[in-house]
Amino acid sequence: MIQFNEVSKRYPNGHEALRNVSFNLGNGEMSFLTGHSGAGKSTLLKLICVMEKPTAGQVIIDSRNVGRASRRKIPFIRRNIGMIFQDHRLLFDRTVFDNVALPLIIAGYPHKEIGRRVRAALDKVGLLSKEKLYPIMLSGGEQQRVGIARAVVNKPPLLLADEPTGNLDPELSAEIMSLFESFNQVGVSVLIASHDLGLIARLPHRVMSLKDGQMIHDELQAGGQS
Ligand SMILES: Nc1ncnc2c1ncn2[C@@H]1O[C@H](COP(=O)(O)OP(=O)(O)OP(=O)(O)O)[C@@H](O)[C@H]1O
């Protein structure tokens, strides 16, 4: 699904955010990405969804070298990736339904299909009864669930999340992580950048760690602690 071969990223100001990073994330695999603030986690995710391009090495998504993709191809690559952000980036002047429908409207889905898919996505995150509400009427955890519904509404094979539990308390964070696990259990590949080492340690998934732009650790956790 994702393959990084000796990838480096230097920003125009000269800062090298990633250095010689290599890893594979297989189809249907779930992994966490950890590291200190500024270690390069967001940069790594941005390279996958082609918001940035590598200065050296190859970023391969589904056998395609996305670092070489033309601007015209980028929207098609992104259609296969669901992105979830810490601040969820919802439109506050649109209802929950309209927020989740947005990727389908952009992709030109027929009206009837949009209703069906949006309700299926809201059902998966437990928010079917709130489709007519505006994001301001929801709790932080619910807003994040709307962001997740929007990311999965067109059934992408890959989910990327950047600090998805950053603003949530431990209980809600655990709920959001189990939501990711439920998508992974039906075959979706999931990569989650997170600072939340306590929560990650309790889950039996692979953990990759960045330090100053280098991959210093990549290990499958045995079974997690309770
Ligand atoms: N557009 C940019 N131009 C210049 N430097 C950048 C840019 N984006 C990020 N950086 C720098 O690259 C380094 C890695 O940033 P990145 O956002 O990838 O880290 P991070 O691990 O996600 O950090 P955090 O956990 O704080 O979000 C940081 O030193 C940051 O200041």
Image (cartoon, rainbow, N blue to C red):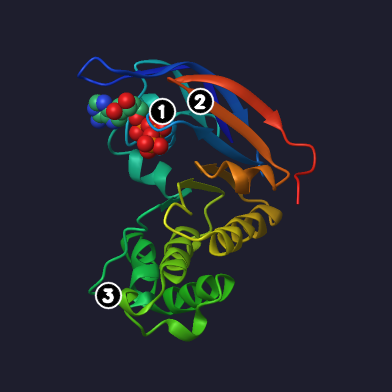
Mark nearest the camera among 3 and 1 is 1
Give the left or right position of residue 59, taking residue 180 as reference. left
Task: Identify the disc placed on residue 210.
Answer: 2
- Which image quarter is the N terminus in? top right
Q: Residue at x 65, y 55 (%)?
A: 181
Question: The residue tagged with tag 2: helix, strand or loop?
Answer: strand
What is the C-alpha distance between the residues marked 2 and 1?
A: 7 Å
Q: Residue at x 37, y 29 (%)?
A: 38
Q: Residue at x 51, y 81 (%)?
A: 128
Dividing the picture into quadrants, the one containing residue 67 is: top left
Three-letter amino acid code at the position of disc 2:
Leu
Disc 1 Cβ-to-ligand 1 distance below 8 Å: yes
Name the residue that disc number 3 marks. Answer: 94
Q: Earlier in the sequence, mark 2 or mark 1?
A: 1
**Is disc 3 in contact with disc 2, using a CB cutoff of under 8 Å?**
no
Dividing the picture into quadrants, the one containing residue 185 is: bottom right
The quadrant of the picture showing ligand 1 is top left
Name the residue that disc number 1 marks. Answer: 40
Three-letter amino acid code at the position of disc 1:
Gly
Dividing the picture into quadrants, the one containing residue 55 is: top left
How far from the left and from the top, in percent, is residue 146? 43, 68
Residue count near mark 3 (Cα–Cα under 10 Å), binned few <14, some 14–19, many ≥20: some
Instruction: Name above or below for residue 45 compared with residue 161.
Output: above
Counting the numbered discs, the total is 3
